[in-house]
Each structure stands twice: as C-alpha cells, then as structure tokens.
Image (cartoon, grey):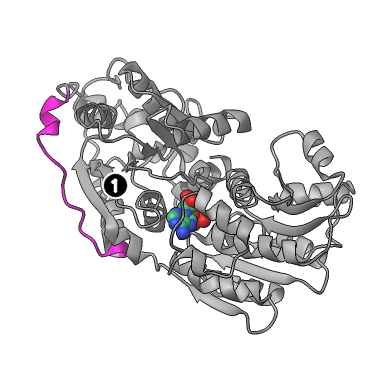
Amino acid sequence: MLFSELPLVNPLQRAVRAVGYEQPTPIQEQSIPSLLEGKDLLGIAQTGTGKTAAFALPILQRLLDSGKFRAPKTCRALILLPTRELAIQVEECFKQYAQFTAISTTCIFGGVSDASQKRNLIRGVDVLVATPGRLLDLIGQKAVSLKALEFFVLDEADRMLDMGFIHDIRKVVALLPQVRQNLFFSATMPDDITKLAATILRPNPVRVEVAPQSTPIERIRQELYRIDKRRKGALLKELLLAHPEMKKVLVFSRTKHGADKITRVLEKAGIKCSAIHGNKSQNRRQEALGNFKKESIRVLVATDIAARGIDVDDVSHVFNYDLPDVPETFVHRIGRTARAGKDGIAISFCAPDEEQDLRAIEKLTRIRIPEGDKAIYEKLPPQQKETPESEMRNARGRLPRRENPAHGKPAQPKTAQKNAQPKPAQKPAQPARGEHPAPSNNAPAQGNAPRHRRRNRPGSRARRRMREAASN
Ligand code: AMP
C-alpha cells in the first residue's frame, strides 16, 4: 500500500512526501482509516513502529475537518508522554506533518522555566504535547484548561506506570470532557495497563497490535565481547577506531558516573561524543541529542532512563557497555537500532561478573549471542597488572571497597563468592595505582561506618538499583 492510497487530505499527503515516507508502516495502515472515522484505538506497539504518524496524521485531519477553532488557554488535542525528550520529539513530528496547515502545536514539560510555555498557551493551541506533572501544574495555575479538548492520546502507557505517573494520569483524565476521541498506546498490556485503558477508552475500541518484541530483535545483528570491566573503555575505543562504518553509535552505561568516564576515554582518542543522563541539564541533554541527530558527534553515551526518550533515525550500532540486569531493558536498548525496517548491529560487552545477566538475556530473547572478532583483543594495551586478591585483603580478610562485592556489583558469580574463603591477609589493602575510584553515586557509606552497615544485606542491590533508576 502507498500513502497516497490512504484517505488523507492534500496538505498531509504533501507533508508525508516531504518527510520521505512512501508506504505506511503496518500500524499506520491499520490505524489511520479507523481513526479518521472517529473510533477509539488501543495500540499495542513500541516506539520505532511508526506509531506517532499513525495517530498524528488522523488527528490533524480531524482537527482540520471539524470546523472548530482554538479558544484562549485551551487545547484541542492532548498527547501525554512520560518524558521530556519524547514530548519534544512527538511535537516535532506533529510540526512536520502539519507544516502545510495552519494547525498550531506546543510542548510543555518539567525541569525548565514555565514562563515561555505559559506564553505559548495564552492564545490557545490545537495540539498540546505534555508530560503529566507540568500539565497539572499549568492547569493548577490556570494557564491552560482541558474543557475544549476533542482528542486525547495516552502514549507509552506502560512506561508511564513504570515511572509512577498513574495518579497524575487519573487526575488528568478526570478533567477531560466526556465527549472525545481517545487513543491509548502501550508496548505491553499487563493487567494494570488493561484496567487503565478501560477507564479511558470508550467500549469496543479498535485494537491494533504490531511488531511483537521478537520481530525486531531478529533483524539485529549481534556480537558479544567477553572482557574484563577495566578494559571495556579500551575495547570500545579500538572498535570505533577500527570501524569507521560505525557512524551513529549509541552506548549504554549502567551509571551516570560510568557514562562520563566513557566519554572521557573516547574524547581522549579524538572520537566526538557526548553523554546524556540525569545529572545533565535539560539544555545540555537536548544539545547532545541534537548533535547526535545531525551527526556532528559520532557517539552518544546514555543511561537507560535518559535513553527512554531517544528517538533517533538510523542508529547504526548500539553498544551495551554494561549489560543491564533486567533482561527486558536489553531488548529496549537494542531496539534503538534496526528501526523502521532498517538493519542494525548491537554489540555487548560482558565482564566476568555479568555472565549471569548475559544468561538471563539469552534466555529471554532465545538467541545465543555470537562472539565478535577476537583479533580485536590483540589491539588492546596489555592488561594492567592487577594485585592478586589475596594481597588486597586487609588484616580482617576484607577487600577494599572497589573490589568488594558488598560495595557494588558482585565481582564474581554469586555461587563463586559463596565458596570463596577469605584468605588471611599478607599485606594491608593496596588498590592498584590510579585505580582508586571516585566515590560512586550509589556506594553506601563507608569509612567509619558501623560494621553491620557494610555487609551485603539482602535486597541492598535492589534498593541501589531503584535509587539509581530514580536519579538517572
Ligand atoms: P515512531 O514509532 O513513531 O517513533 O517512528 C519511528 C521512526 O520511523 C521515526 O523516525 C519516523 O520518522 C519513521 N517513520 C514513521 N513512519 C514511517 C514510514 N511510513 N516510512 C518511513 N519511516 C517512517
């Protein structure tokens, strides 16, 4: 099917041609006709399937057809998204698709001053793209009202719930007029999402399900490098230097501190890169993303939370510098490449203490990741001489913080740790020169902390992950 065969009006057909789409993706083909008829829609689809155009084009057409006009401090269509980056990207899409119409759009999100956002709402807007917190804030300040709303889209519903937005969503839904067209998108449909959808959609919505998670993954070529964690930076650098075809590279780091460290290694090697994570200001993140999109930097290093909003075309390679300990995160990460029918390559580094994570990932994806070209290991500088563990233990048989699994990821698989007997110390703890780490954001208090606080208490890893997720 061609776009020209869809019943879209001329200004939208022109816009679609201008952005270079020829054929609708499956979700577009299945959703656009029903949405043009005014039906509600439940879309089960991930980012990368073309779902934004699937809802934006029919909404624009119905806004044009309805003969209504925007009133001051109101919006006619509201698109709710979980992150600022996603909100900005979706508004950019609306702008592109509406470029040959008089439809107005604006975007509101937290983390920046609300002054210009309020100014943009004074005269009213046709399409408002928003994150829930800032929307409620501006409604509270009477900068915008939802009373004239005609279209409501809840996008990325599963992520919204993951990020704790359920109460905000309920508050927004309570403010919507009864008569409206609703669109609800989620990558997955567990029970709580199904229940939420039922409170928003009219009965018997059109249900469209596309691209189950396994389909894109099979299109992604994968490679695995088993490597000590201290040599990951050198390996990444060598791979990038050896492969100029790695043009638009997204690197995932588990921590913000790690992301900064990676950029320092690459910058030193003359590789243009930036990091995005929760410690970077909104402007710096947008700048980095913009530079990556227009390819003025080759590598973008991101934490999982910061990467949630990334929608960049043609990511050629995704690197899992650290393996995620939630296997589903791996699927989300590598799905950043091989978008919209294109091929992609995902390269994963696995340190000895990540073998368990690797097994969980291979089990979930049912794919055994093949090992990459081993010749690259020869290009790496020789491994720094490491102090044998027996020499690093102090008089009490404890390892220094960096080496001690109680203070970070376990250095060995859990069973091995259990079996390992602390050896009597020969010397006091001496971390290798230059290896003494800056205190990690996640490290528990140390030094004079009472002994019981330094033990690896059950659940401490989970708590650390939650703190990390909240701040990344
Ligand atoms: P989305 O799932 O909406 O985030 O879209 C993923 C990417 O696919 C975006 O970069 C879109 O510009 C692109 N895209 C959407 N629809 C089409 C299409 N029909 N043909 C080619 N690319 C598309």
Q: Amino acid at mark 1?
A: Ala
Q: In the orientation shown, which residue stands out farthest toward the front?
A: 10
Task: Tell me what residue is drawn at x 40 percent, y 25 percent.
Answer: 263
Q: Secondary structure at mark 1?
A: strand
Name the spot of residue 164 as percent of width and height, x first: 64, 56
Residue 107 in the image: above or below residue 210: above
Residue 453 in the image: above or below residue 343: above
Residue 245 in the image: above or below residue 8: above
Name the spot of residue 383 as percent of width and height, x first: 17, 24
On the picture, is 85 further left or further right than 237?
right
Task: Work out whether residue 48 can be spotted.
Answer: no
Residue 319 in the image: above or below residue 26: above
Is residue 372 one of those drawn in magenta?
A: yes
Exactly how many numbered labels are in the figure? 1
On the picture, is 323 further left or further right than 89?
left
Pick whichever, 104 or 111, lies toward us. 104
Pick whichever, 324 or 119, lies toward us. 119
Is residue 335 one of those drawn in magenta?
A: no
Task: Tell me what residue is drawn at x 55 percent, y 78 percent.
Answer: 207
Q: Which residue is mark 1?
A: 346
Quadrant for the N terminus in the image: bottom left
Task: Tell me what residue is drawn at x 50 percent, y 26 percent.
Answer: 448
Name the spot of residue 405 as percent of width and height, x first: 34, 39
The chief SS type of the magenta part is loop
Task: Work out whether residue 269 can be spotted.
Answer: yes
Segment colored magenta: 364-380
On the picture, is 443 further left or further right than 334?
right
Name the spot of residue 236 as percent of width and height, x first: 27, 31
On the picture, is 387 further left or further right than 46?
left
Q: Residues within 10 Å of mark 1 (few under 14, many from 20)?
A: many
Q: Quadrant of residue 56?
A: bottom right
